Amino acid sequence: MRESVAITITESSHTGEARRAAIALATRLGFAETQRGKVGIVATEVASNLIQHAQGGVLLLRLIEHHSDVGIEVLSLDKGQGMVNVDECLQDGFSTAGTLGNGLGAIRRLSDLFEIYSLPNQGTALLAHLWSDSAPQPTEKTLEIGVVCLPKRGEEVCGDAWAYQVDHPRHLLLVADGLGHGPAAFSAALSAVRIFQEHHHRSLDGIVESAHAALRSTRGAALAITEINLEQQSVRFVGIGNIAASTSSFIEHHNLVSHNGTVGHEIRKIQEFSYPWHTNGLLIMHSDGLDTKWRLDRYPGLSQKHPSLIAGVLYRDFNRERDDVTVLVAKEMGNNS
């Protein structure tokens, strides 16, 4: 499961649905019984918090991987009253809803990674990672990736797709948006991912050329590939169509340049652009299912959070809701506050 699974939480019965979906995913991934139990408790507590404190929201589940290690990401998003003091809300016994007030503390204790981003009157985003074994400890420079990838409401499959490949010291990220939505768009995006994975050792324009040939039998796709070289502190980018991409840091911001066209049908120009990468850098790529009017500086401190929280907040606040949507965020491992 590369894309997210979204469970709308608006009433108490949805708590059980969230728990069942989380345990089913943990079972499919080979989690031991004890770990499956933790996953079920976390999903239940997260869903209960959405009902009690936000009058509803959405819970997203996603497979996460690091080499041979597998885990589950639980991402909770709401537009409720938010938290004035996050640290106070994490204390056992603190409650604004007349409950025992142990929910957030339990989630934090059971999770291998736990983060919250909340603004008063704007809502809360909560992130938990639970690994099948002990949480992985990267020994080399790498990127943390956060992704929300969801189909248009009512569709069974997502016409967007993403992929990540490491060819040291190159880190390559792809976002593809099959034309339209539904199974035909899904097929086009999947073909783009396959070509990317098979040819990631090539130059970026070489990958796009291969994708252009392979996607001729499909309805085509918008496509963008970013290469981040952590040793050279450089970014290379090639984009065709309306995949938006930007890099930002404490020093500067760049909107990455794409050319018009549809991979598989008509490409007028394939051009690679180069940009600097800073150690506190942040990459954001997204399909046109996300409104482009977002500005990260309107969310104090969000850029220092885990990429999944950043992707989740942008999805929550700028999802167009009439198309498939992918939001991919990457930052260098170890730069979290």
Image (spheres, grey):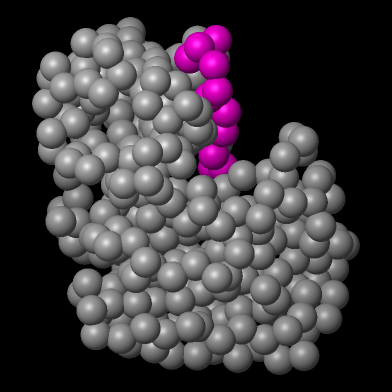
Q: Which residues are magenta?
A: 2-15
Q: Is residue 43 visible?
A: no
Quarter holding the C terminus? bottom left
- Residue drawn at 56 percent across, 42 percent down: 3
- Residue 323 or 82: which is nearer the viewer? 82
Q: Is residue 15 left or right of residue 301?
A: right
Q: Position of residue 185 (x, y in %)?
A: 79, 53
Which residue is at a point 79% across and 51% down the rendered structure image?
181
Between residues 52 and 188, which one lies in front from this camera angle? 52
Is any part of residue 111 visible from this angle?
A: yes
Q: Is residue 144 above or below residue 64?
A: below
Residue at position x 21%, y 11% in the image: 100
Residue 331: image location, x then y, percent:
31, 64
Q: Position of residue 156 (x, y in %)?
A: 75, 35
Q: How many marks are shown on the rendered structure? A: 0
Among the 4 quarters of the image, the one containing residue 124: top left
